[in-house]
Amino acid sequence: MEKYKIDRIQNSLKENVSEHRYIHTLGVMKAAVNLAKKYNEDEKSAYIAALLHDYAKNFSQKQLNEYMTNNNLYADEIMINAYQLLHGKVAAHIAKTEFNIQNDDILNAIEYHTTGREKMSKLEKIIYLADFIEENRTYHGVEELRKVAYEDLNKAVLQALNNTIKYVLSLEGLLHLNTIEARNSLLIEL
């Protein structure tokens, strides 16, 4: 990808996310590139997917809903009710339409970074995991997850999915079927 396009994405990202989110994004990019090196994935794809994964994270519920409607994007009932999950879908659409990202693996990694999904690609797993282990994260258990991330990608993603499921259940929140399918798919793979 041309340097000017990456610069354009970074400049646009700075204008559209909070400083906190931008710092998080830089951490995800660093983790994603390191994981890509470790697991022989395309580093540039990891960089771009990480850069754009939270592009729509600071959108309000109204902005996300309007974007979805205006662009005829489908959201299931769980995503509509747990609107925070929409930011991956919106970010993937923005990546494709505004930044001309045509690589389906990159677009899927952006779209599914919040829920995971059945039979995730290696890049999807890397972005999903990098979002959890980036250097600015400080939650209980992150150090253990970082360690596992560099030992076994699938086991680390499974651990991250388990953590997500436990967390959502503790909040009595809606759990997306994609997350359950991602977990089951990984268990079968392992």
Image (cartoon, grey):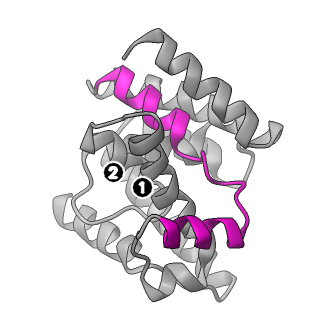
Residue closer to the observer: 68 or 139: 68
Residue closer to the observer: 143 or 168: 168
Residue 4 seen from this side:
yes
Q: Position of residue 169 (x, y in %)?
A: 60, 83
Q: Quadrant of the C terminus?
A: bottom left
Check disc 2 and report the residue beneath it. 108
Q: Position of residue 66 (x, y in %)?
A: 60, 70
Check disc 1 and report the residue beneath it. 111
Q: Position of residue 141 (x, y in %)?
A: 64, 53
Residue closer to the observer: 111 or 68: 68
Q: Residue at x 82, y 36 (%)?
A: 19
Rounded to the nearest angstrom, the CA distance separating label 2 from label 1 is: 5 Å
Identify residue type, mark 2: Asn
Q: In the drawing, does residue 83 fall left or right of residue 158?
A: right
Q: Residues within 10 Å of mark 1 (few under 14, many from 20)?
A: many
Identify residue type, mark 1: Glu
Q: Residue at x 27, y 54 (%)?
A: 120
Q: Which mark is residue 74?
A: none
Residue 148 seen from this side:
no
Q: In the drawing, does residue 62 fall left or right of residue 165?
A: right
The quadrant where residue 22 appears? top right
Q: Residue at x 51, y 58 (%)?
A: 90
Q: Please name the predominant secondary structure of the magenta segment in the image.
A: helix
Residue closer to the observer: 92 or 132: 92
